[in-house]
Amino acid sequence: MTLALLSMAAVGCSEPDSYDDPKLDVTPHNISGEWKLVKFEGANPANGSYVYLDIKRQDRKFTEFQNVDNAYGTVRTGVYYIYTDEAHGAVIRGEYDYGVGQWAHRYKVTLYGRTMVWTALGDDSVVCVYERCEIPEEIASQAPVEDEEE
């Protein structure tokens, strides 16, 4: 993603010690939920920064909450796509709403129970490690309200 991921915090989620959990199939159902970025390019998160993803399976939408490019936090929404590539396995790509653009990379996705690892295609140094985690209410409340269709 074009997430400005240079510094993050691991507030409320623990960093995975290993990937001993069995691998799960990468499907919209299995990745659906709330995730916290706990590691980026092998770096430990910076204090006070965060990146959360709320991934919805039914309509392939996501909401990204992050404060790495400003102190007040940014909320972005968009859609994601999962497909299988013979060379890489499960791959995720996405685009932001409101003409903001596509993610900076497509990512190979590996799912280990409560840990999800994204590795950028074409640049193995870009690795994002997410862990399932409830997004704190003070951050989740910043999400845009979707219109309900009757």
Image (spheres, grey):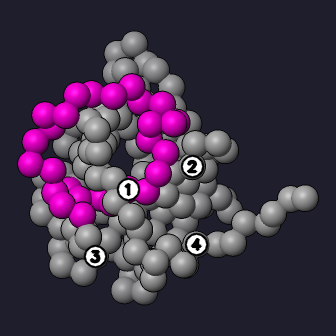
Q: Residues within 10 Å of mark 4 (few under 14, many from 20)?
A: some
Going by the numbered disc 3, the residue's amino acid type is Ser
Instruction: Confirm whether the magenta stretch covers residue 29.
Output: yes
The residue to which callout 3 is attached is 49
Q: Position of residue 100 (x, y in %)?
A: 60, 61
Distance of mark 3 from mark 2, alpha carbons?
A: 23 Å
Q: Which sits in the foreground, 11 or 93?
A: 11
Q: Is residue 136 above or below residue 106?
A: below
Q: Quadrant of residue 124?
A: top left
Residue that protrudes farthest toward the left in the picture = 17
- Label 1: few (<14), some (14–19) or many (≥20) C-alpha neighbours in 10 Å: many
Residue at 49% from the left image edge and 57% from the top image edge: 54
Q: Does 75 sit left or right of 89 as displayed?
A: right
Q: Residues within 10 Å of mark 2 (few under 14, many from 20)?
A: some
**Disc with the residue nearer the chain's start (2 vs 4):** 2
Q: Is residue 6 left or right of residue 43?
A: right
Q: CA distance from mark 1 to mark 3?
A: 15 Å
Residue pictured at 55% horizontal, 54% vertical: 62
Q: Secondary structure at mark 4?
A: loop
Q: Which residues are magenta?
A: 13-39
Q: Which mark is residue 56?
A: 2
